[in-house]
């Protein structure tokens, strides 16, 4: 029986790259987001994807952010230390994952919108059997969480310590240069803020 639930391995994981330090996330999400492009979101079971699309959400100054109106039980992780994963449920059926950024208490983060699958692709296909092509496995925030086995169980895990099955890595590929911002997708407020960035020409980027 195939499951998308992550089961922690008994042996220490050898991550294929350098784990991003806390200070990387301890900045304005509008700085972090474009620099996350081409970094790698990895799972200890071997699944991994290169980040090719992101959106920044900026707490109390951003009407589209979950944290705009303050701290609640649902968004509490956003107000915690940077470098943790914030996972939320949307439309009654999908999970979406973010990296918490900025100062503790700020409520800021970066939504990971799309990945380019680079490892563990057969495992991704097993949990997304209706994806016609590899480019359909992680081309959207809900698709990538399903492909990577991310659910509410990962809400609050520390990506920097990387002891709970997931982390973000630098494998040597630099972020693209001079990436222009664009409008974020699927929001009703803050539509004039150009806080979405993506790798131009990458076929794994989600479609509006």
Image (cartoon, rainbow, N blue to C red):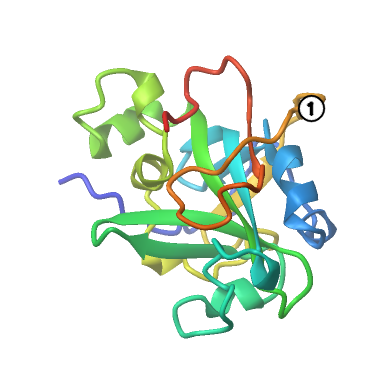
> Farthest top residue?
201
Front residue of this view, candidates 26 and 70:
70
What is the tally of numbered marks visible in this picture?
1
Q: Residue at x 50, y 85 (%)?
A: 72
> Farthest left residue?
1
Label 1 packing within 10 angstroms: few (<14), some (14-19), many (20+): few
* Horizontal arrangement in the rendering, residue 179 relative to residue 107 (left or right): right
Quadrant where the C terminus sits is: top left
Q: Residue at x 48, y 59 (%)?
A: 10
Which quarter of the picture shows residue 127?
top left
Q: Residue at x 50, y 27 (%)?
A: 205
Residue occupied by mark 1: 174
* Horizontal arrangement in the rendering, residue 202 relative to residue 146 (left or right): right
| Image location (x, y in percent) of residue 184 | 55, 44
| Image location (x, y in percent) of residue 69 | 56, 79
For residue 125, above or below residue 191: above
Front residue of this view, candidates 187 and 146:
187
Which quarter of the picture shows residue 81?
bottom right
* Horizontal arrangement in the rendering, residue 6 relative to residue 100 (left or right): left
For residue 18, above or below residue 52: below
Front residue of this view, candidates 5 and 77:
77
| Image location (x, y in percent) of residue 175 | 76, 29
Front residue of this view, candidates 88 and 194:
194
For residue 182, above or below residue 19: above
Q: Residue at x 75, y 50 (%)?
A: 30
Give the structural element (helix, strand or loop) at label 1: loop
Which quarter of the picture shows residue 197?
top right
| Image location (x, y in percent) of residue 112 | 55, 46
């Amino acid at each position: 029986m195939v499951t998308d639930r992550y089961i922690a391995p008994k042996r220490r994981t050898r991550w294929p790259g350098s784990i991003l330090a806390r200070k990387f996330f301890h900045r304005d999400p509008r700085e972090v987001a474009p620099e996350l492009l081409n970094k790698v979101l990895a799972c200890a079971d071997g699944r991994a994807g290169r980040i090719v699309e992101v959106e920044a959400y900026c707490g109390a100054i951003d009407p589209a952010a979950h944290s705009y109106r303050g701290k609640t039980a649902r968004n509490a992780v956003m107000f915690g230390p940077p470098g943790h994963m914030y996972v939320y449920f949307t439309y009654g059926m999908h999970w979406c994952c973010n990296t918490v950024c900025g100062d503790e208490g700020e409520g800021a983060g970066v939504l990971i919108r799309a990945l380019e699958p680079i490892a563990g692709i057969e495992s991704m296909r097993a949990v997304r059997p209706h994806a016609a092509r590899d480019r359909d496995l992680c081309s959207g925030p809900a698709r990538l969480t399903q492909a990577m086995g991310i659910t509410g169980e990962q809400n609050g895990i520390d990506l920097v310590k990387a002891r709970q099955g997931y982390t973000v890595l630098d494998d040597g590929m630099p972020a693209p240069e001079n990436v222009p911002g664009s409008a974020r997708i699927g929001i009703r407020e803050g539509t004039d803020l150009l806080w979405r960035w993506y790798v131009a020409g990458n076929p794994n980027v989600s479609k509006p």
